Amino acid sequence: MADFASDNTAPVHPKVLQALIDANSGNVPAYGNDPLTEKLQETVRMVFGVSEARAFPVFNGSACNGLALARMIRPYESILCHRQAHINNDECGLPEFFTGGKIVGLEGNHAKLTVASIGDLIETTLGHAPHTSRPKVISLTQSTELGTVYSLEELKALTGFARTHGLYVHMDGARLANAVASLGCTPAEVVAGVDILSFGGTKNGAMLAEAAIILNPSLIEDFAYVHKRGGQLPSKARYVSAQLQALLENGLWLDLGRHANRQAQALRAGLIDRAGVGLLHPVEANELFVTLPKVMADRLFAKGHRFYNWPAEGSDAYRLVTSFATSDDDVNTFLADC
């Protein structure tokens, strides 16, 4: 049966596994001083178009976000994000634990922030200083928690606003490959104006492999201390770097993102005209949020299909997530059983 519970449930891509096997030979320097981690730096600079960028391998996305944010704010400052952002809802307060600061969740259609919503908050907050936390970071999720994608125009407006107001920009890129594939642009265009990127590998074919990619050179020097103090400096960093290198070189990560997006579109096309099925948000990456008749959902669960009820979007709302491993048979079987 089909598994649309999450892209976290997918296996490791064979090329990533092969990269781990290839890395598993001989003794090399530890703590990121190995040739594979050094090669990853060159690849990251080329892919994202920033000559001084530096990647710090980590084990998981929540810690990656926490470390990135810890480098950018002080305990009396705040992080502005969408109310439904992962850092606000799904990380058990880890970003606040790592930073000592405050997360402020804002509204916005389809889980996207707008300049207007941020501007109103900043004006109100600074007018009440020093009694409220000072805004310092805008955190953008690309693609968003609701499967939508910020356009390049939206990103340019938000990063430009941040620069004007002295704010840093963090991008949670757990599903960045899906966003870049959806936009049909270069990775460099998507991260233009971003200070630190949380680059996701685990949802896109890797195993315990993410990276905090510092795109603003002024933030690099002290990040090594944040990396170590946060318990995310791998002693055998080559095994994390090898996975990320395998994804980034030759564009594998984007190929996998495109495949997941195509399967999401196939699901959308097969569901949209069925009686009682409603689409809650545009399908722009690899997530669908739909309403289903309860009898249909129950029948699908009974047949062994896996996906989640999503009460935050309504009592009859459900989330379906595709991945690089989603096959045509998965989609066709699911649609047939509908």
Image: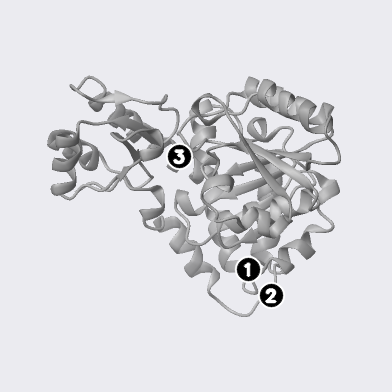
Badge 1 element: loop
Q: Earlier in the sequence, mark 3 or mark 1?
A: 1
- The amino acid type of the residue labelled 2 equals Ala
Vertically, is 252 above or below 114?
A: below
User: Which of 138 and 159 lies nearest the eye of the viewer?
Assistant: 138
Find residue 64 and report its horizontal and vertical position in percent: 63, 55
Find residue 116 and report its horizontal and vertical position in percent: 68, 20
Vertically, is 179 above or below 233?
A: above
Identify the residue position indicated by label 2 in the image.
30
Q: Earlier in the sequence, mark 3 or mark 2?
A: 2
Q: On the rendered structure, is 260 left or right of 53?
A: left
Circles 1, 2 touching at the beta carbon (< 8 Å): yes
Classify 10 Å Cα crowding around label 2: few (below 14), some (14-19), many (20 and above).
Answer: few
Circles 3, 2 touching at the beta carbon (< 8 Å): no
Classify 10 Å Cα crowding around label 3: few (below 14), some (14-19), many (20 and above).
Answer: many
Q: On the rendered structure, is 126 left or right of 193?
A: right
Identify the residue position indicated by label 3 in the image.
257
Q: On the rendered structure, is 241 left or right of 30?
A: left
Badge 2 element: loop
Tell me the residue at 63%/22% (across/down): 154
Identify the residue position indicated by label 1 in the image.
237
User: Which of 315 and 29 lies nearest the eye of the viewer?
Assistant: 315
Tell me the residue at 53%/59% (across/down): 243
Tell me the residue at 23%/42% (across/down): 330
